[in-house]
Image (cartoon, rainbow, N blue to C red):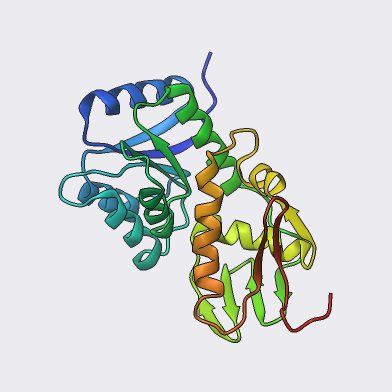
Amino acid sequence: MEVQTKGSVLLVEDHQDIAELVYEYMEDVGYELDYAPDGEVGINLVAQNDYDAIILDLMLPRRDGLSMCRELREKMGKTTPVLMLTARDTLEDKLKGFEFGADDYLVKPFEIEELEARVRVLIRRGHSAPSAEDTLRVGGIEFDQKSLVVKRDEQELILSPIGYKLLKILMERSPGVVSRQDVEREIWGDMLPDSDTLRSHMYNLRKVIDKPFDKSYLQTLPGIGYRLCDPDAAH
């Protein structure tokens, strides 16, 4: 019986034993995989092919995972979901990975079933249907969902793929409050991330949409959730 293809995945990993384990398991359960042993080969493959997801090791020869991820987002304009693999588990490392464009983070050693589940969620979220309303507006922030162009006061802002999804959720419900649990469920489904992941993504979103400006739209309500609202509007 032929296994239905679940998606095309690029695996960028220099450790042969890990690469073989991931490659064989993911192929067995129905994914089509390409493999790159370093970041340079990975960049070349992304330039030539479209993938549904990328599994990217942080520490790579020739070009590390952060550098590769940044080039994917900033120079190549790729929004392909990226799951970053690393032996590091500090908040600083996670913040840096998310800032450079990673969508999810898995610390080595990991269970192969969890890796597959996280890739599946990333692919499903990447294929999710857009909102019926093409352009969202909250005060001076405008989000064209078809072109993925975000502007604040006519200045274009560049977000990570998760950043776009967070902004969409918050803008659709503005000026209401969205609980942390609702945000996590909307983005990651049942495969909830660790406690640092959402906080890291929110930190990076705030840095892009608020830090360069004199007024803040994104509010954190401790113990409750998050809200995006026009600071000049009455609520």
Between residues 71 and 51, which one lies in front from this camera angle? 71
Residue placed furthest toward the front:
222
Residue placed furthest toward the right:
235
x, y percentage for residue 167?
63, 63
**Residue in the image at 50% along x and 65% along y:** 159
x, y percentage for residue 207?
50, 69
* Position above or below: 143 against 111: below
**Residue in the image at 27% along x and 37% along y:** 13
Residue placed furthest toward the top:
1
Count of all numbered marks drawn on residues in the image:
0
Q: Quadrant of residue 78?
A: bottom left
* Position above or below: 15 against 90: above
* Position above or below: 74 against 52: below
**Residue in the image at 49% along x and 27% along y:** 114
x, y percentage for residue 39?
24, 48
Determine if residue 6 is in view: no
* Position above or below: 112 against 49: above
x, y percentage for residue 128?
65, 48
Q: Is residue 128 left or right of residue 199?
A: right
Q: Image quadrant for the C terminus? A: bottom right
Q: Quadrant of residue 138?
A: bottom right
Determine if residue 1 is in view: yes
Q: Quadrant of residue 147?
A: bottom right
**Residue in the image at 43% along x and 22% along y:** 111
Q: Is residue 228 left or right of residue 69?
A: right
Q: Is residue 77 left or right of residue 149?
A: left
